[in-house]
Image: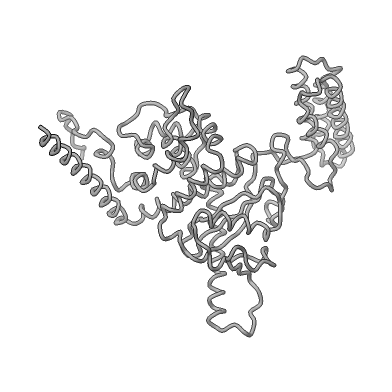
Amino acid sequence: MAPKQISQSQLSFYNTFEEQLSHRHPLYILANQINWGIFEQAFAALYSEEGRPAKPIRLMVSLLMLKHVRNLSDESVVEQWFENIYYQYFSGEKTYACGVPCEPSELVHFRNRIGAEGIELIFKESIRVNGKDGGEQEATTDTTVQEKNITYPTDNKLHRKIIKKCVGIASKEGIELRQSYTRTVKKLLMEQRFRNHPKNKGRARKADRKIKTIAGRLVRELERKLTPSLHQDELSLFKKVLMQRKTDSNKIYSLHEPHTQCMSKGKEHKKYEFGSKVSIITTKTTGVIIGAINIEKNVHDSKTLQPAIEQQQRLTGIILKNNFVDRGYVGVKEVLGTAIVTPDKPGKQRTAYQKQKLRNGFRRRAAIEPKIGHLKQDHRLSRNFYKGIKGDNINVMLAAAGMNFKRMINKWTLNPLAFLAQLFQTALKLLKIQYGLIQNCYNLKMSF
């Protein structure tokens, strides 16, 4: 049967998103649950009274939230904002806005402007939105690695990058090198092909040594010809890479991310991971993330508990009764008033009830493993594209905030009656506005 023709004679009476959009949509509900005023109040001091007017703070904060809730890049979230009216309502728009909200690079500047402290405020609000689910007295903790956006490091790769950067510095500063080695390096690369073949191993190793020699030669030539105040940090980094050996500690694995650490978590499919360690704390029963902090150094898991629990107490204001961890945290019994519970051999002094309670706690602890998996696959924790240590801190907290918001979105989607409370709050808000308008009209009439 052919569809009925829709009459186009009557124009719509709807004018605003409040009248047009479905009040059952999770993003509509979430937009009215978040306290946007705290961001306006906290970030207003970061702007000057002079210069070009900035983008609205709510718009920029909402784009950061949507990016990690929907697992999008800066470019994609800006493009989809133009196409999605629920994104626009979430960002504070009252009617449809034609055009992109900002340039993708403005999100980079905004993240750097508010810093890790501002991102932590967004993370704190994501915990508050989850309500009483984030206020449990027991939690679970585990660590993982957020990998940096670098290639798998090898000495030969680093040496070739040093050669390329040295030639670039010389070109930028107008220095004439004795030789750029462009053709030589290209021939050496051909000799390194199929290096695992028994007949090619010796030739490939010889090419590796030659490339390292060329890199050192260029670094020393730049040191002689450059002004002492120029590019000294880069040259010292190059020299450290050229001097490091296989067994050294605190090695450099990337020239553009020199703080990257090498970590081995015992995975069969991925022996080594290059990035930074992350500590995640979730509530034991509901799974709300109440702590997510980046650890700069590759330290033992037990040493990550102090900063992680400090952050959790700062965000929630709750001193946890028990924190269930795995055997990697062995040796720590209590941190900042929170008991650290590690699996051990049950003693005779424990009752059957105590043993069963601990057993249930450790079974619930295993639920943090898929939680971390979803953080990586769905909320951009698997590969960190933000630069530097500041980028590490920002990425982990935004990923955790995005997962907390996504948890409430899923809850409102799966429960058809969950939107009734929000409808009641919206109706109450409209009644207050109407009452205020009537009161103003009455006062105006009495004044005449």
Q: Is residue 241 left or right of residue 101?
A: right
Q: Quarter holding the C terminus?
A: top left
The colour scheme is: one colour
Q: Is residue 87 left or right of residue 154?
A: left
50 w.r.t. 120: above or below: above
Residue 287 x %, y %:
49, 60
Q: Is residue 294 left or right of residue 171?
A: left
Residue at 42%, 35% (x, y): give it. 59
Residue at 49%, 46% (x, y): give it. 121
Q: Is residue 10 left or right of residue 318?
A: left
Residue 150 x %, y %:
67, 38
106 w.r.t. 149: above or below: above
Residue at 54%, 33% (x, y): give it. 108
Residue 318 x %, y %:
50, 61
Residue at 60%, 42% (x, y): give it. 384
Residue 404 x %, y %:
46, 52
Q: Quick one: 283 or 403, which is closer to the camera?
A: 283
